């Protein structure tokens, strides 16, 4: 009962915090006349990564089409492409499809944008519960530290900035975490293996619709499930291997979803393996600024020869690894130094939690694959985003390894003091991003444009009193300044986190 109350308290608190920082405004953009520049910053559509999925959601609901009209294409540019004089968004359509029911609900209450974005917040809330559940039940970490792991992920990492927006990262994280949990249940629950195997393949299939690169994060999970399907039995002096065929049979779910996506590509782009990303980009700014017809021809030719080759190459790795780990503009450990403790947790966990070796290998592999792949990515910065948005699934993984390290060193008060300082600092950076803007240029562009980068850019927005928070702009702007709003949120998170951190920690259930 106490555990249930603790989880409910976490969900209630998290809902309030996400609600306080959701970005948006009242009204139904495009359906109603909105007297504002929808792309203004800070705001819900300051990034084309938010505008494009919303434009497609609108087109699907209002026009019944995956294609965009000219007005929507201009709004979503430059994350749009053109195929046979028809406009499409450059991303897979999964997020827009998931957003449709929330758009319809919001539209009925003249809050289409707000409710659509809030729909994605549900996945962020689910992820907090999943982080707690994996920490508590898979790795048997005590309740207070398991709750602390959820608090780290939710409010001491830059995942917060993307918890109420039309980015794919929280939905991807949800399917990765649920699949890992399903793989563990597949291993430990004999009677329900069909259910868990089906969910893993379903999650993989859905991820194809959400974000193509995220599919590789499922590789260690699939391998975990397959290994759990092999039973070694000794017969006399020999050994026999029994193979459970459930993963093979249930893989038809993934094949069906992938085939359906191939059909989507065939209908819209002329072939099952033709992706929107390979079509010529429709960038209104570039087209408007370029009047030289020869230059336009060069742009068109370059766009028509795009391919997936060279998107991720090993010669880009070291630069990308630096950018994603410690660089001041995007480094995960620069924005969230509390996660540095997770590196120690990964090392020590293999020495202490020996009974969960397969689980540890699988779970840590999600992080390693995530960071190694995007370190080799052509754009490791993730565009103008607050922190390393590509690593949001890894932030969930690292949050759990952080508390594993805290449990292993639970008798050392210095460890908790260090964790306290790092947590408050990380929460301060995460809160700054949540109350201001997600648009932060990478250093390579900021230097050229003479702008600030990293959270230094957000600090400038903050001291100017600008916020993207709907709640603050609608209800509090005339009563408290942004500094007070920020301070109240940060103090609450810090106190809650310190209470969880310094509660007396019990022993794990199963020891080593």
Image (cartoon, rainbow, N blue to C red):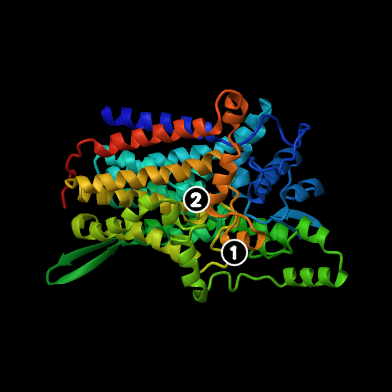
- Quarter of the image containing the N terminus? top left
| 393 relative position to 482: left or right | left
Whole-percent x and y of residue 70?
81, 49
- Marks 2 and 1: in contact by CB < 8 Å? no
For the point 43% across and 36% down, the residue is 490
The answer to which of marks 1 and 2 sits earlier in the sequence is: 2
Real-space Cα distance between discs 1 and 2? 28 Å
Q: In the figure, 228 relative to 505: above or below?
A: below
Residue tagged 1: 444
On the image, the x and y values in percent for residue 472 come to 57, 30
Residue beneath the point at 47% across and 55% down:
391
Side (left or right) of 151 relative to 291: left
Q: Secondary structure at mark 2?
A: helix
Q: Nearer the viewer, residue 392 or 431?
A: 431
Q: Nearer the viewer, residue 228 or 405?
A: 405
Tell me what residue is drawn at x 76 percent, y 46 percent. 72
The dot on residue 472 is none
Asked if 280 appears above or below 434 in the picture, the reply is below
Q: Residue furthest bottom?
A: 315
Please tell me in which quadrant of the rendered image residue 459 appears.
Answer: top right
Q: Is residue 399 visible?
A: yes
Image mark count: 2
Q: Secondary structure at mark 1?
A: helix
Residue labelled with disc 2: 172
Q: Residue at x 56, y 58 (%)?
A: 382
Is 336 on the left or on the right of 452, as rendered?
left
Q: Is residue 49 left or right of residue 152?
A: right
């Amino acid at each position: 009962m106490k555990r249930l109350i603790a989880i409910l308290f976490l969900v209630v608190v998290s809902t309030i915090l996400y609600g306080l920082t959701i970005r948006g405004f009242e009204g139904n953009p495009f359906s109603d006349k909105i007297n504002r520049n929808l792309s203004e910053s800070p705001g819900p559509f300051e990034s084309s990564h938010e505008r494009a999925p919303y434009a497609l959601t609108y087109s699907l609901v209002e026009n019944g089409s995956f294609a965009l009209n000219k007005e929507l294409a201009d709004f979503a540019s430059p994350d749009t492409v053109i195929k046979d004089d028809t406009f499409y968004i450059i991303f897979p359509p999964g997020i827009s499809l998931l957003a449709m029911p929330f758009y319809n609900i919001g539209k009925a209450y003249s809050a289409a944008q707000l409710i659509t974005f809030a729909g994605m917040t549900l996945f962020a809330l689910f992820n907090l519960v999943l982080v707690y559940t994996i920490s508590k039940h898979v790795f048997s970490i005590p309740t207070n530290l398991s709750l602390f792991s959820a608090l780290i992920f939710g409010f001491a990492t830059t995942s917060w900035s993307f918890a109420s927006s039309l980015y794919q990262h929280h939905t991807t994280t949800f399917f990765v975490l649920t699949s890992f949990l399903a793989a563990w249940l597949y291993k430990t629950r004999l009677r329900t293996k069909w259910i868990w195997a089906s969910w893993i393949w379903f999650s993989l299939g859905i991820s194809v619709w959400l974000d193509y690169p995220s599919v590789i994060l499922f590789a260690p999970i699939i391998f975990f499930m397959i290994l759990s399907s092999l039973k070694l039995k000794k017969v006399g002096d020999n050994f026999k291997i029994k193979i459970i065929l459930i993963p093979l049979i249930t893989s038809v779910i993934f094949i069906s979803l992938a085939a359906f996506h191939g059909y989507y590509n065939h209908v819209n782009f002329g072939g099952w393996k033709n992706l929107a990303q390979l079509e010529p980009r429709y960038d209104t700014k570039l087209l408007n600024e370029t009047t030289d017809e020869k230059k336009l021809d060069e742009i068109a030719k370059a766009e028509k020869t795009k391919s997936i080759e060279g998107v991720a190459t090993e010669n880009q790795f070291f630069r990308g690894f630096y950018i994603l780990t410690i660089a001041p503009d995007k480094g995960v450990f620069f924005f969230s130094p509390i996660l540095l403790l997770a590196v120690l947790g990964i090392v020590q966990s293999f020495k202490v939690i020996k009974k969960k070796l397969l689980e540890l290998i699988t779970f840590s592999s999600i992080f390693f694959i995530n960071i190694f792949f995007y370190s080799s990515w052509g754009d490791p910065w993730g565009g103008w985003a607050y922190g390393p948005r590509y690593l949001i699934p890894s932030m969930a993984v690292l949050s759990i390894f952080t508390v594993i390290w805290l449990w292993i060193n639970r008798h050392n008060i210095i460890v908790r003091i260090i964790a306290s300082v790092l947590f408050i600092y990380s929460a301060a950076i995460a809160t700054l991003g949540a109350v201001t803007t997600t648009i932060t240029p990478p250093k390579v562009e900021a230097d050229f444009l003479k702008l600030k980068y990293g959270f230094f850019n957000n600090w400038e927005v903050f001291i100017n009193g600008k916020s993207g928070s709907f709640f603050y702009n609608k209800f509090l702007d005339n009563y408290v300044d942004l500094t007070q709003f920020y301070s109240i949120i940060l103090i609450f998170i810090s106190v809650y986190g310190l209470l969880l951190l310094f509660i007396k920690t019990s022993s794990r259930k199963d020891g080593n």
